Amino acid sequence: MRTIPPLLLVAVACLPGCIVQDIHDEIALSNTNLGNIEGRLVSIDGNLDGINRQIISLQEQMNQTNTKLSDLQTQLNATNEHLASLRKTINNIDSTIPFLKLSGDDDEAKEALESDTASQPAADGPAPAKEPAGG
């Protein structure tokens, strides 16, 4: 067993020098390529970090926009309720004083509005009494 390493050393020494040099050159080229690849990977990693920061920033902006839209929706719903109440009041005035005709609603729209009023209790108290249409 002790004779094998010296024999191996003799065998390697007998190899032509150009093969050993080629192996050495290829290993050096491989190391250079690995260095280039590592540099590219570091660059890609930096780019991904930048993209990640941008995505986080966009997510925060979207969250703020969603909050603002939610607040706006609440305000729009309240405005819609106020306008519906105003429309009902105008229709009540029209039914009390028919010759004014403030609402511009046709009979079907008035009936739909009145059926909506009947299904929801009035927030401001009882509705005014309606006079008969003939009087």
Image (tube, grey):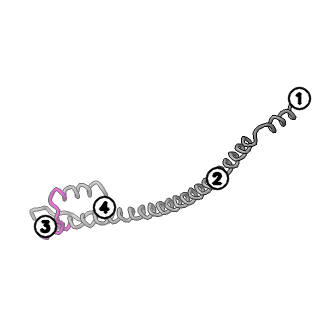
Residue under circle 4?
A: 122
Nearest to the eye among marks 2 and 4: give it. 2
Checking the image for residue 101, the label placed there is: none
Nearest to the eye among marks 4 and 1: give it. 1
* Magenta stretch: includes residue 47: no
Other residues around mark 4 within 10 Å, as few (<14) / some (14–19) / many (≥20): few
* Magenta stretch: includes residue 107: yes
Indicate left or right for 47 with 8 as reference.
left
CA gap, disc 3 and disc 4: 22 Å
Which residues are the magenta region?
A: 92-110
Checking the image for residue 98, the label placed there is: 3
Checking the image for residue 38, the label placed there is: 2
Residue drawn at point x = 46 percent, y = 60 percent = 62
Q: Do the residues labelled 2 and 4 touch (CB within 8 Å)?
A: no
Checking the image for residue 1, the label placed there is: 1
Q: Toward which corner of the image does residue 81 lie, by quadrant? A: bottom left
| Rendering coords of residue 11 (x, y %) | 81, 34
- Of the residues under marks 4 and 1, which one precedes in the sequence? 1
Q: As drawn, which residue projects farthest toward the top? A: 1
- Of the residues under marks 3 and 4, which one precedes in the sequence? 3
Q: Are marks 3 and 2 in contact (CB under 8 Å)?
A: no
